[in-house]
Amino acid sequence: MIVLGIETSCDETAAAIVTGEGQILADAVLSQLDEHRPFGGVVPELAARSHLENIDSLVSQALSEADLNFSDLDAVAATGGPGLIGGVIVGVMTGKAIAAVRDLPFIAVNHLEGHALSARLSERSSGNAELSFPYLLLLVSGGHCQLLIVEGVGTYRRLGTTVDDALGEAFDKIAKMLGLGYPGGPAVEQAALGGDAHRFDFPRPMKGRAGCDFSFSGLKTAVRHAALALPEGPLQEQDVADLCASFQTAAADALADRTAHALAEFKARHPGGNALVVAGGVAANMAIRQRLNTLTADYGVRLVAPPGRLCTDNGAMIAWAGVERIQALGADAAADGLDFAPRPRWPLDPDAPAAAFAGVKA
Ligand code: KG4
Ligand code: ZN
């Protein structure tokens, strides 16, 4: 089986080709970072236009990388939501057009499901033992911060979500506040390397509270207040490093506390469950990975972190989610109609209540 995957829900235009065995034959990603950088964040209208300009050539690039033609494809999968709706429309229309012309099944993939299943792809493509269901997923990106039990393809139980900012968003806003540029995550991580994590005593939001929800806006405000309380004039490099290190440690502690609750709930529901998967752009952060590694050791589960390329937005995880759907349901049942309507909001667990101020992050 050969599936084309298209991803256009945020600021990466991506097309990839993946086989039923989990081989990534092509993985083309075009980041729009340079277009959004002057604005310090993703501008939805610019993103949609840029997806439209680039998606066709990315699909061609993926096909030529894989040395394949449209006639070799068995299905087309595209992100159908949640995300910035202009971009999602571009990807969905492109996928539908290819499917219509080539008479292929079209599969609208939930972007979060792409992240959720990406670790099964990376474990397979790196030759490791199969990552079997159920597992706990910590999804931390610029748009989402959630803990979910992945029980099977299409079966997700959300244990917690952010009630305000996603963690990547907090990294980005703090970087902007400290003059570190965009995207913030890698810049904050880099600056933190030379900083003193004990200099500022920042809050660990939600720590000790029941449940698995997150909150990062109070931590972000605390960093702002600490920066404003420093002597007037431009921030010194050491101050920035100390602020970043103290913030990153507080964020990692908060994540670990919430994830510990989720691990306890996961083990209670599934005593045999043995893996925590961390995915999304923030999963690239080494300090956070180390913190999670210590935590999983305490619970006797292994930490699975897909390589950075599969953690940030990409087409391979969308193609793979298409493969998984076809393998689970058969091509006919897995396919969506060409009347599928792109979805700005699309919770993975339809039974989970929407969080008050989290927007699409819930
Ligand atoms: O998954 P992703 O590429 O896009 C979505 O948001 O869906 O994640 C991007 C986010 C950005 O907020 C970026 O600042 C953050 O992931 N990020 C990091 C790191 N690398 C990327 N955050 C912390 N540390 C990093 N090394
Ligand atoms: Zn994403």
Image (spheres, rainbow, N blue to C red):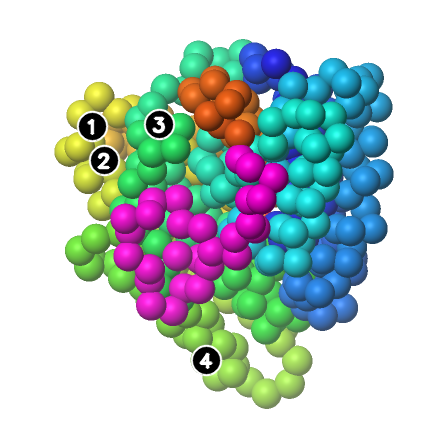
Region in magenta: 336-362
Q: Which amino acid, mark 2?
A: Phe
Q: Earlier in the sequence, mark 2 or mark 3?
A: 3
Q: Earlier in the sequence, mark 4 or mark 2?
A: 4
- The reply to whether the C-beta atoms of the residues labelled 1 and 2 are less than 8 Å apart is yes
Q: Which corner quadrant holds the N terminus?
A: top right
Horizontal side of 43 relative to 242 (left or right) equals: right
Foreground residue among 311 and 112: 112
Q: Quadrant of residue 261?
A: top left
Front tag of 1 and 3: 3
Disc 4 to disc 2, C-alpha distance: 37 Å
Horizontal side of 51 relative to 210 (left or right) equals: right
Question: To which residue does mark 3 refer?
Answer: 152
- Label 4 sits on a secondary structure element that is helix
Q: Earlier in the sequence, mark 1 or mark 4?
A: 4
Q: Which amino acid, mark 3?
A: Gly
